[in-house]
């Protein structure tokens, strides 16, 4: 697992352009075959990579937080929604709620998420490598290779298979 994270650190920037070109190429194929292949590699990546040894998304990215997330998080934390928003969230340039500060305030020193059961939808879905229509989002996946070793593994493996 450590090897995969180290490999990612070394190669993600180096291979960004080739990964992006590959992802744009498969977008044109519009084939659902990429969903199956990406899901297989997603399973491989997360069988080797332990998010608790990484936490890079929770440290650097931060999720968009929708109204349903706010309701769920507030209930879990036994806070009023307004209090949750005031304490932890801010509004970005696009009008979406995001965390007020990063690393995420819910990330513990042990890399556990203190609101795991109630975490935002965006956290549950990241890094989107098991999503439907994988091939339709080349820019998203290319960018995620720079943040997430699992996403990097998936895209690199697809390039080799592809
Ligand atoms: S960046 Fe990827 S591998 Fe790292 S914690 Fe997030 S989802 Fe897991
Ligand atoms: S809410 Fe939890 S999973 Fe989401 S960024 Fe914060 S620590 Fe990570």
Image (cartoon, rainbow, N blue to C red):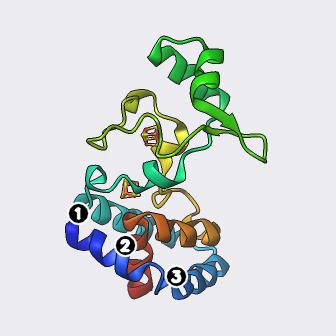
The residue located at (27%, 60%) in the rendering is 49
Give the quadrant of the N terminus. bottom left
For marks 3 and 1, give the CA distance.
22 Å
Q: Which mark is residue 153?
A: 2
100 versus 133 height, above or below: above
Crowding at mark 2 (Cα within 10 Å: few <14, some 14-19, many 20+): many
Mark 1, secondary structure of its residue: helix
Residue 85: quarter of image: top right
Question: Residue 140 appears at what percent x and percent y?
Answer: 60, 65
Task: Where is residue 45? Give x, y as percent.
Answer: 31, 65
In the rendered image, which quarter contains the C terminus? Answer: bottom left
Local SS, label 2: helix
Residue plotted at (28% across, 65% down): 44
Name the residue that disc number 3 marks: 16
Tell me where residue 27 sits by quadrant.
Answer: bottom right
Q: Pointer 1: residues within 10 angstroms few (<14), some, or many (20+)?
A: some
Residue extending farthest to the right is 94
Label 3 crowd bin: few (<14), some (14–19), many (20+), radius 10 Å: some
Q: Position of residue 51 (x, y in %)?
A: 31, 52
Q: Is disc 2 in contact with disc 1, using a CB cutoff of under 8 Å? A: yes
Foreground residue, 108 or 123? 108
Q: CA distance from mark 3 to mark 2?
A: 12 Å
Q: Circle 3 sits in a helix, a strand or a loop, which is it? A: helix
Which mark lies nearer to you, 3 or 2?
A: 3
Q: In this image, 77 relative to 108: left or right?
A: right
Quarter of the displayed picture in which ligand 1 can be seen: bottom left
Separation of disc 2 and disc 1 at Cα? 10 Å
Seen in the picture, residue 150 relative to 69 is either above or below; the reply is: below
| Image location of residue 116, percent across then percent down | 38, 32
Residue hosting label 1: 48
């Amino acid at each position: 697992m450590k090897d995969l994270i180290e490999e990612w650190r070394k190669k993600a920037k180096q291979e960004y352009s080739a990964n992006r070109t590959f992802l744009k190429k498969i977008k044109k194929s519009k084939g659902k075959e990429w969903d199956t292949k990406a899901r297989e590699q997603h399973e491989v990546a997360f069988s080797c990579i332990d998010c608790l040894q990484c936490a890079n998304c929770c440290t650097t990215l931060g999720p968009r937080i929708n109204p349903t997330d706010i309701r769920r998080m507030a209930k879990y934390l036994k806070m009023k929604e307004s209090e949750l928003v005031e304490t932890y969230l801010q509004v970005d340039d696009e009008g979406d709620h995001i965390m007020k500060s990063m690393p995420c305030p819910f990330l513990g020193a042990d890399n556990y998420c203190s609101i795991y059961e109630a975490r935002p939808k965006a956290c549950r879905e990241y890094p989107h490598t098991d999503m439907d229509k994988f091939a339709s989002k080349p820019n998203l996946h290319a960018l995620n290779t720079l943040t997430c070793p699992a996403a990097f593994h998936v895209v690199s493996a697809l390039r080799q298979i592809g």
